[in-house]
Image (cartoon, rainbow, N blue to C red):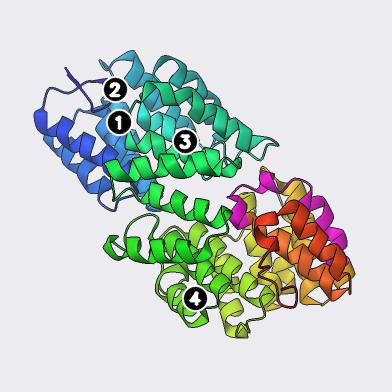
Amino acid sequence: MFKDHYGNQITTGVDQARDHYDRGVASFLAAGHDAADQFAKSIKADPGFALGHVGLARAQMMSGDMASAKASMAAAKTCIDGATAREQAHLNTFDLLFQGNPVGCRAAVKSHVQDHPRDVMVAQLCSSVFGLIGFSGEVGREADLLAFTSALMPHYGEDWWMMGIHAVSLCETGRLAEADRLMEKSLALNPRNANAAHFKGHTLYEMGEAHAGLAYLKDWIKGYDNRGLLHGHLSWHIALHSLHVGEIDDMWTYIDSGVGPGGSKGLPINTLTDTAAILHRAELAGIAVPPERWAEMSDYAAKYFPETGQSFADLHVALAHAMAGNGDRLAHVVDTAKGFAADLVRPAAQAWGAIARQDWQGAVDHLIPALAQTERFGGSRAQRDLLELTYVNALMRLGRDAEAKHTLAMRRPVLATHPPVAGLQ
């Protein structure tokens, strides 16, 4: 019996199965494009290697191929007998995920890593702003994420993945200097770690370093395969930095080549949320957005997210429908909102509708309850600035400029010096 790269015993006696599994894990943790291929090679070398099948299922899930992912999980279950207790618990944790039980899966992850802190494929389920803690819908989830990665850090030593993933926890809780130092160490160990590059982009945003963020990400993305999981989202960061520094032609170039439905090869949730967000933030900054772009996004949202349930997605679905003037679709979101932050989705969706009607007081009234707990929507602070800036813009439309400036200075001071809202600079 071999051990994987992180020292966990794995039930395979085939060198190639272990080696390809380790490569698959490394690719997955770095948001590479070939994780599924490496896991497939692992189980080709040893068809009875259960965790190879689980790894393949996870990689397929993250590429949006749920039918294949479920088949891979079924295959894993057929060969789990005889595996270690850790491997069986590993499979059971992922089974909760595939059953659509995020609450149970989150609890299972937290329990599992107490005994097996270096079971990295399980640990990563709760890491990052896009993990099970990030999308828990709970107040205090940023502090919860920091506590989770802080507890894991001592078990990993000089590990590039752990450094990068802990760095984003630090970033989202305002510990920017620490985050930046740790990100640099992660990238020094693995310069092609897309997760760390992504988090460095976040840190530069939170520092107000738009020019530096733009230069860094434009250079880094050149060597990143556009099939990589984060290619579209990194393109969004570049488009956002371009908007903030006034390079509008570049903003549209990155939207069309990497962010929007025509250019992104990422998951639908990223294509939807990133595109809707950058279009609205462009409008807030005074950039005209052609109506056909909003119509395209409304149709995309209706195709991929016809029903509510994922609150972060629902927030942006409602935005797309409102800006496209599709009142019936918007009403469906308001009427049927469910999921981890449904109580916030409803007023936010109503606010988008009010904005589309230029009912600025109505927008302010509906945004206030959503702004009280924006972290519950999920996503990063940079993504949730969509709501902060919309509120500030609505105040300005009501002639309440001093209140708008004070609100931004108190809630998002990093944006107060050069507010990306037309008329507020």
Q: Nearer the viewer, residue 266 or 199?
A: 199
Q: Secondary structure at mark 3?
A: helix
On screen, residue 301 versus residue 193, left or right, reads right
- Residue in the foreground of this view, choosing between 113 and 338: 113
> Is residue 163 one of those drawn in magenta?
no
User: Which mark is on residue 251?
Assistant: 4
Per the model, the C-alpha gap separating discs 4 and 2 is 49 Å
Q: Is residue 63 above or below residue 273?
A: above
Mark-to-mark CA distance, 2 and 3: 32 Å
Amino acid tagged 2: Ile
Q: Amino acid at mark 4?
A: Met
Mark 4: give few (<14), some (14-19) or many (20+) Cα within 10 Å: many
Residue, disc 3: 166
Residue 277 at x, y percent in the picture: 60, 66
| Upstream in sequence: badge 4 or badge 2 | 2
- Callout 3: few (<14), some (14-19), or many (20+) C-alpha neighbours within 10 Å? many
Distance, label 3 to label 1, CA atoms, is 30 Å
State the mark number for residue 76.
1
What amino acid type is highlighted by mark number 3?
His
Badge 4 vs badge 3, beta-carbon distance below 8 Å: no
Local secondary structure at mark 2: loop
Find residue 346 and report its image quarter: bottom right
Numbered mark located on residue 80 in the image: 2
Residue at 40% in and 36% down: 163
Q: Quadrant of the C terminus?
A: bottom right
What's the magenta region?
Answer: 362-383
